Image (spheres, rainbow, N blue to C red):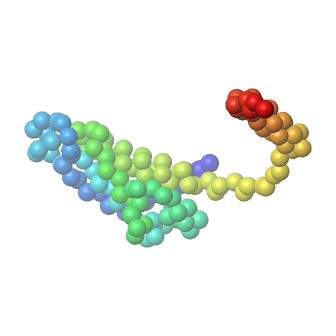
Amino acid sequence: MPTISIPEDEIVFTAVRSQGAGGQNVNKVSSAIHLRFSIPNSSLPEAIKERLLALRDQRITAEGVVVIKAQNSRSQERNKAHAMARLQALIDSVSTPPKHRKPTRPTLGSQRRRLQRKTLRGEVKRMRAKVESD
């Protein structure tokens, strides 16, 4: 399965300050990266665009823009590479079309076994019931 490469001119990187612990480094260095990638305006094949937009992913906005925030590292370059890898993984997850489901029916033997189990279970439950005295 060949991976689809994403041209860097279609991606917008913004450096922002990281959240959380990190001492002075967090307060003075913008090392976190916001990656923005517009699906409708991209050069991806139409089938992949449709599957991406159909995903129920919180990283994809209503306008079809993928927003990924990477702040794992103290290095801006490593965060940029991490954000790119996450975007690539998202696109790779929809790059193969879903298999067409061929409708099937349960076999006669499996239907019989199911009904047998239901009957036995019903017997167990019936035996637990209060005994009626005449």
Query: Is residue 40 or residue 59 the one in the foreground?
Result: 59
> Where 81 falls versus 63 (above or below)?
above
Query: Is residue 134 or residue 72 the one in the foreground?
Result: 134
* Position of residue 18 measured from the top left corner of the image (x, y, whole percent): 21, 45
Label count reads 0
Q: Residue at x 55, y 66 (%)?
A: 50
Left or right position of 41 against 92: left
* Position of residue 29 measured from the top left corner of the image (x, y, whole percent): 15, 45
- Can residue 126 be seen? yes
* Position of residue 59 measured from the top left corner of the image (x, y, whole percent): 39, 56
Residue that sits furthest to the right in the current view: 108
Tell me which corner region of the image, top left, top right, bottom left or bottom right, holds residue 101.
Answer: bottom right
- Can residue 10 be seen? no
Tell me which corner region of the image, top left, top right, bottom left or bottom right, holds residue 74.
Answer: top left
Tell me which corner region of the image, top left, top right, bottom left or bottom right, holds residue 120.
Answer: top right
Query: Is residue 129 or residue 70 the one in the foreground?
Result: 129
> Where 42 falls versus 4 (above or below)?
below
Q: Residue at x 40, y 67 (%)?
A: 62
Left or right position of 19 against 109: left
Quadrant the C terminus occupies: top right
Q: Residue at x 13, y 39 (%)?
A: 25
* Position of residue 92 measured from the top left corner of the image (x, y, whole percent): 53, 51
